[in-house]
Image (cartoon, rainbow, N blue to C red):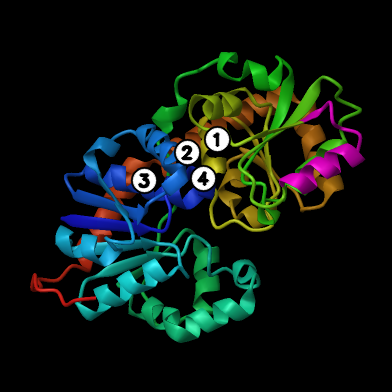
Amino acid sequence: MRIAHLITSLDPAQGGPPAVATRLASAQASHAAAVTLLASHPQARFDEVRKSLAQVRGMDRVAVAFTSPGRDAISVLRESNIDVLHVHGLWQPQLLFALRWADRNGLPFVITPHGMLSAFSLSQKPVRKRLALALGWRKLLGRASYLHVLNDIEAADLGKVTAAVRLAVLPNGIDTAEFQTQLGEEPIRELTAGRRYVLFLARLHHIKAPDLAVDAFATVAQAFPDVDLIVAGPDGGERHNVFERVARLGLGARVKVVGAIYGAAKVALLQNAICVIQPSRHEAQSITLLEALAAGAPLIVTPECNFPEAQAAGAAIVAPGVPDRLGEAMRAMLSDAQMRAASAERGRALVAEKYQWPHIGRRFVDLYRSCVPARSASFTAA
């Protein structure tokens, strides 16, 4: 089977979608599928993208192609003679044009919205998104072979946007092997100065709520003077506000805003954290939370993270997205080493059982096969 994944960007600073697309493609290639991964050329960020791809096990089996002004996505897709197209994300013209081309040629296609059709996401720039839906996206969503959603919550949101579609409910996954080797503190010694810490690891964006993480830490900082908060992640528009908030609360010596962290340093940060706090205002399904569990870090999350499985497994404390309640959860986590150890073991077990890419990748290949008819190899022009 010949599969193509199309995504706007493979830049790791874009968060979950590039991580999902690369690792899903790699997992599928391990099942003897011929997989192409296609994205816009990263230009000035090429070195960062290249390093990120090199860290994904099995990416050498995936044909990675970048579009450019002289070589658009449709040209690459036509040359690849694919059986199925899997598009990650919405709204971007590159994705829209490729889906229209696939639809005209009877090429099966799957769309993963990555949470972009949630009620929260649609409330951001709502006029622009309603117009985009009216001008083509709603029709294409309805004509997809499958719309891939991560859980029943996302499925319910999607049902409010488009009807009469086939849904495939499959979770994100991770490669647990990336987190099995204990790296110790050496890769992060300059970041931590050997001190204990709670970790916030996400884009510094309003939706990820770094402000709530800082405010929650402020409620416990005096009671736990040996613990810092590390805020790690690329800027998504909130970095300046985070620095201002830290200064206003007098926490400059205790909150370390360290920027984007990848590779071994990220793994080590997760492995050595007391816990990970992610008080997001919305998540479809967070890759970071899966990685944290695989690394043995207990979680503090909000209900909007949409990860009830972690709470049910005893691997997370779920608290409302207000500083006092998040602070209570943090206090409980910092005060009880036995609870943290038990949560860590339960989290590792949960990820190993339900969220491994090899198994999920195989299920996707089966899904594609169910929607690939015998068809002509003749394709029309864009």
Q: Tell which tag, 2 or 3, sits nearer the viewer.
A: 3
Residue 156 in picture, x, y percent from top left: 53, 71
Task: State the residue at coordinates (56%, 35%).
Answer: 292
Q: Is residue 76 magenta?
A: no
Q: Is residue 114 left or right of residue 313?
A: left
The three-letter code of the residue at mark 4 reads Ile
Q: Tell which tag, 3 or 1, sits nearer the viewer.
A: 3
Residue 69 in picture, x, y percent from top left: 33, 61
Which is nearer the N-term, disc 2 or disc 3?
Answer: 3
The residues bearing labels 2 and 1 have C-alpha atoms spaced at a distance of 7 Å
From the image, tell me which residue sits under label 1.
293
From the image, tell me which residue sits under label 3.
22
Which is nearer the N-term, disc 2 or disc 1?
Answer: 1
Which residues lie in the magenta part?
239-255
Q: Alpha-carbon neighbours of circle 3 within 10 Å: few (<14), some, or many (≥20)?
A: many
Q: Tell which tag, 1 or 4, sits nearer the viewer.
A: 4
The three-letter code of the residue at mark 1 reads Leu
Pick the front one: 89 or 272: 89
From the image, tell me which residue sits under label 2.
351
Rendered image: mark on residue 287 = 4
